[in-house]
Image: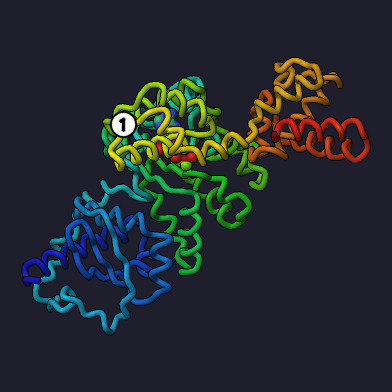
Amino acid sequence: MNSELATQYQSLWVRVQARLKFSCGEAVYRSWLQHLVLAEVEGNMVSIHVPTRFIREWVMSHYLNEILAACKQEMPQLMHLDVRVKPATTNVTTLQQKPVEEKLLLPTVLPAKQDLDDMPSGAVLDPRYRFSSFVVDKSNELAFAAAQRVAESPEVIPGCNPLFLYGGVGLGKTHLMHAIGWHIRAHNPKRKVMYLSAEKFMYQFISALRQRDIMTFKEQFRGVDVLMIDDVQFICGKDSTQEEFFHTFNALIDQNKQLVISCDRSPSDLEEMEERVRSRLGWGLVADINATTYELRLGVLQMKCEQIKVSVPKDVLEFLARKIPSNIRELEGALNKVVAHSHLIGRQITLESTQDILSDLLRAKSRAVTIEDIQKRVAEHCNIRISDMHSARRARQVARPRQMAMYLSKKLTTSSLPEIGRQFGGKDHTTVLHAVRKVEELISQDRIIAEDIRLLTRILES
Ligand code: ADP
Ligand code: MG
């Protein structure tokens, strides 16, 4: 490598490291990231060396996104990172051989403070996740509208802090949070946005504890105007992280910073969270995202096809929207599979080819019982209306079948108690838990009920 190029890379690496120091915090940087050595840049691939296997594992599992993002900002063409173990003593690469003092333009190549402040902190935002690529219908309109308002407002909106988004897997929570981030960055770049997963929050907190450097941990949230923490259920039951989260949370709210939190359940269903944390989480605007509708699924598929510029026959899209109701992520996965396959073998996509390509997935799906099926079968069997499954009527002749249906939903589907509660007309998870226990008790005491449950299970599983 010629010396000019080596110098260029050397200074580029200094900039990458400065970004990492900023986005991950001084302590994390000092313990893990300063050991990274740029070994080579080739096309869209960057090779990095680290001194030990342990550091490699830790860095790969915790900071890969950050490293990739920091590198990408300096080298937009970058696609791949290759991290290898090279003990420090033998780590004499072309770049390291360069007499560093000679041309290390440290003071001038360090990004100006301005640049650093404009950098995305926390994790990287996915460029696909924008408001414009989010399909809205009644299942997600409240969450969408709230997210948009938070993104558009130049300051905290009274009554919307925190914005708490909740809903099942793959229904667009992360998508909305990234969309908020992109919007603010485009329209109000002075507002500093930080997005990170609760998991990452926890790891950063733990390593700060280990480094005895909680200050730096706290410091990174100081200049932030909008903090978004994704999948907060992750820190349930993790006591000290939860405590720190609560302090950070309170401090930011007191400083009138906007918080956006996502979770797989409502604040009141966060059982392992301390009561005071739970209630504070529910202070602002709580917006849920409900199970998808057929129209939403079809809409997402159509939008996806436009985005990737492929034309897929209408009957195929309808078929997918009908057969894969669980969540949007899975639906997208199925569409990608069908499209990739047709590219590969160079044939048109048809309903037949789709059924063929997805046969394994669909077979697994068709075996899966849905809560709707259960409600329908139990209502038929017990001679009540389906609407009674959603009602709050307590009369024994409807309450008992409803409890049986809740019990079967717990046994035969993978839905959580809160999710089951939601599908039974918005009941609390404790109601579902009570129903499950009650029916278990009845099965052991009442032969007729035991027989009903056995029969219903057989019908539903066939
Ligand atoms: P969650 O965080 O709720 O588990 P994600 O936000 O990761 O879900 O969404 C999963 C996938 O589905 C993403 O690729 C996302 O873009 C897509 N998606 C979810 N909801 C919508 C929607 N309403 N419109 C367009 N895409 C969506
Ligand atoms: Mg998510």
For the N terminus, give its image quadrant.
bottom left
Q: Compared to 209, does 417 lie above or below?
A: above
Residue at horizontal 46%, vertical 63%?
Answer: 208
**x and y percent of residue 299 in the render?**
40, 23
Label 1 secondary element: loop
Residue at horizontal 36%, vertical 25%?
Answer: 302
Q: Residue 11 lies in what quarter of the image?
A: bottom left
Q: What colour scheme has been applied to the protein in the rendered image?
A: rainbow
Q: Residue 348 lies in what quarter of the image?
A: top left
Mark 1, residues whose alpha carbon is within 10 Å: few (<14), some, or many (≥20)? some
**x and y percent of residue 94 in the render?**
16, 75
In this view of the protein, which residue sits in the foreground, 351 or 231? Answer: 351
- The kind of residue tagged 1 is Gln
Residue at horizontal 83%, vertical 35%?
Answer: 439
**x and y percent of residue 131 in the render?**
35, 29
Residue 162 appearing in the image: yes
Q: In this view, does 251 lie to the left or right of 105?
A: right
**x and y percent of residue 9 in the render?**
15, 65
In this view of the protein, which residue sits in the foreground, 97 or 122? Answer: 97
Q: In this view, does 359 lie to the left or right of 275?
A: left
Q: Compared to 142, does 128 lie above or below?
A: below
In this view of the protein, which residue sits in the foreground, 181 or 190? Answer: 181
Q: Compared to 36, does 176 lie above or below?
A: above
Residue 259 appearing in the image: no
For the C terminus, give its image quadrant.
top right
User: Label 1: which residue?
Assistant: 348
Q: Which residue lies furthest to the bottom in this view?
A: 89
Residue at horizontal 30%, vertical 56%?
Answer: 68
